[in-house]
Image: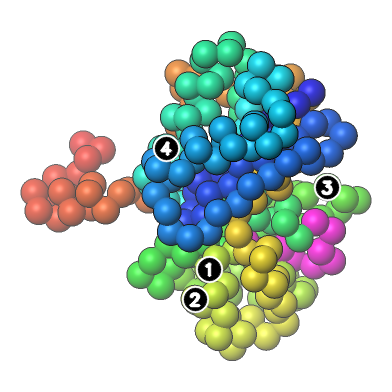
Amino acid sequence: MKILSVDSSSEAASVSILSDTGLIGEMNFNYKKQHSVILMTMIENLFENLNMSIDDIDGFVVSKGPGSFTGLRIGMATIKSMAMATKKPYISVSSLDGLANNIFGANGIVCPIMDALRGNVYCGIYKFSDNILSPLSEYMILSMEELSKILNSYNETVFFVGDGTEKHSEKLKNLVPNCVFAPSHLNLTRSSSLGYIGINLLLQGLSDDLNASSPLYLRKSQAEREYEKKTGMSIDD
């Protein structure tokens, strides 16, 4: 099986092609280019450089979030369109799962954190056991203080990974004494890490419903929050 994997959950854009035996090719771009401008070009360039086409692809993987509202919508719309056009399966995987998989095999608690602004982070808590990544929590949006209380209760080394480390590392060092930070190149959401998880799910026969799947936001968009503040009405009402 060969799959195309896309991650557009953060400022970085990442596309890769994997098979069930390993990574074939990957492109990463982290220079604040709009995903609507660069994502399809990256996919086309990857196919061209690998002398492949969409006809060689058996399935698709895309990040469902959390992360950038606009980026997630663009990535999912792109992959859904390809899956619909080719009648091939696709599956969405959390960007937090992908980040945790960046430090595969870490001996301790793994905590991916993505900046969610206003002093908060999108986060999850994981642990590797027998080379299997197991979630210990739901996907969450928390302050540093809230997150540190949960992590310290495990009384284990905590491995932080993700773009949230760049903004919050100094504070986390004080709040979580027994912690380690992944090197900067592992803090990017990588489509290959996402794809590794996704291809194994596809091989198990799992896939998403084109009509039912949607991005995982964890909170309302800025436009929705501003509307509710202005009108005093909830979008959910």
Q: Quadrant of residue 201?
A: top right
Tell me what residue is drawn at x 30 percent, y 49 percent: 221
Few, some or many C-alpha atoms within 10 Å of disc 4 (few <14, some 14-19, many ≥20)?
some
Q: Are marks 2 and 1 in contact (CB under 8 Å)?
A: yes
Residue corresponding to mark 1: 164
Tell me what residue is drawn at x 47 percent, y 64 percent: 115
The image shows residue 212, relative to residue 176, as above or below, that is above
First of labels 1, 4 by sequence position: 4
Which amino acid type corresponds to the residue marked 1 in the rendered image? Gly
Does 160 sit left or right of 156 as displayed?
left
Which amino acid type corresponds to the residue marked 4 in the rendered image? Ile
Residue corresponding to mark 3: 132
- What percent of the width, then of the height, locates residue 131? 87, 50
Tell me what residue is drawn at x 35 percent, y 70 percent: 118
Q: CA distance from mark 1 to mark 4?
A: 22 Å
Callout 1 secondary element: helix
- What percent of the width, then of the height, locates residue 44? 56, 33
Task: State the extent of the magenta-drawn residues as a range.
Answer: 104-112
Which amino acid type corresponds to the residue marked 3 in the rendered image? Ile
Please give the label number shown on residue 213. Answer: none
Please give the label number shown on residue 74. Answer: 4
The reply to whether residue 197 is visible in this rendering is no
Q: CA distance from mark 2 to mark 4?
A: 25 Å
The image shows residue 169, relative to residue 63, as above or below, that is below
Please give the label number shown on residue 167. Answer: 2
